[in-house]
Amino acid sequence: MRDMRYTVSIDGSLVRPEDAKVSVFDRGFLYGDSVFEVFRTYEGTPFREREHLERLARSAERIFIDLPIDLETLSREIHEALDASELPNAYVRVVVTRGSGPIVLDPSTAVSPTRVIIVAPVTPPDPSLYEAGVPVISVRHAQSSSPAAGAKASNYLDNLLAQREARAKGAHEAIFVSPTGDLLEGATSNVFVLRDGILMTPSLDLGILGGITRAMVMKAAEREGVACAEGRLSIETLELAEEVFLTSSIREVMPVVRFDDRVIGRGVPGPVTRRLHATYRALIREEIERSRKG
Ligand SMILES: Cc1ncc(COP(=O)(O)O)c(C=O)c1O
């Protein structure tokens, strides 16, 4: 792809975007047999990079991919790509596939994992969405008991189809709901519900991704003195929800004002959501300052 907005590193070497190619025999391509991370930089500082790389390592371990390099080396390669991009506010995607091998399912046939780093300008949602809040839809989804549950593996077909359905219905995001009516997570986000002044979010043992933003928002809630609990949240919880929001590295804290045909709270972003978003941004600022001090 000839697009100068991208900076790409493959297996430790920077390559021009138009030369950024992996083999058709790569299992990432053939089977979605890979793990990945997405995070962003603010004013040149990658936010929570260590947590993202550690999650990448855990995801790889969960699906038995041996990371080809240690996290320090991977971090150096990411910083090399970031420097080359010269972008102060960058989107960073790191992908590690199981590598190439004969076309057989047995993963032991692949020998050498492929690693790809893509840096691009970050495109956060339009500020008007934070002002107005967004509609979301529910999509039924089996609670995952797969060994890969909770790993950030690249097999995103269910998420992609849910996102498609959301867009077709004019919604911003699809929220997966288990067959027994438990809220799980968004197609690319975690979900929080405020009810009776208590912030609640689905627990990780439901097989969902442990979002880095989710963890930071829980920290923000603690700082703000907002009680926060993890557990099972039935979709009925939403009937009396005062506020709902989504979290992800790129969207940060996105207020939800409609869930299917239910209006959430007063139909506008609530005060706790706004406060937690402001505190989340304060945590970002603190990380930028810390990294500047060295
Ligand atoms: C399925 C899923 N859940 C949750 C998240 C949020 O994770 P994070 O806050 O680490 O970006 C994502 C992000 O892409 C995701 O794809």
Image (cartoon, rainbow, N blue to C red):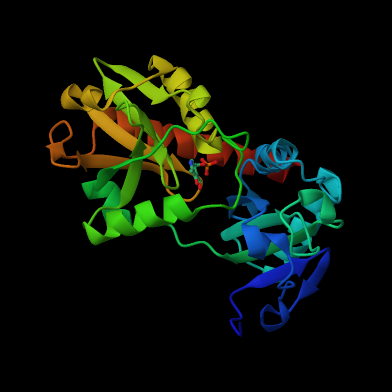
- Examine the rendered structure and indicate whether residue 263 appears above or below residue 90: above
Q: Position of residue 253 (x, y in %)?
A: 39, 40
Give left or right: position of 130 versus 236. right
Is the residue 172 above or below the residue 287 in the image?
A: below
Residue at horizontal 29 percent and vertical 56 percent from the top: 165
Front residue of 8 and 225: 8
Quarter of the image that includes the C terminus: top right
Q: Nearer the viewer, residue 249 or 180?
A: 180
Q: Is residue 171 visible?
A: yes
Residue 94 percent coordinates (x, y): 67, 55
Give the quarter of the figure containing the N terminus. Answer: bottom right
Instruction: Name above or below for residue 80 compared with residue 21.
Output: above
Quadrant position of residue 263: top left
Task: Using the image as rendered, state which of residue 83 and residue 204 is in the foreground.
Answer: 204
Q: Which residue corresponds to the image point at 60% horizontal and 44% vertical from the top-left? A: 152
Q: Residue at x 21, y 48 (%)?
A: 132
Left/right of residue 204 with respect to residue 171 in the rendered view: right
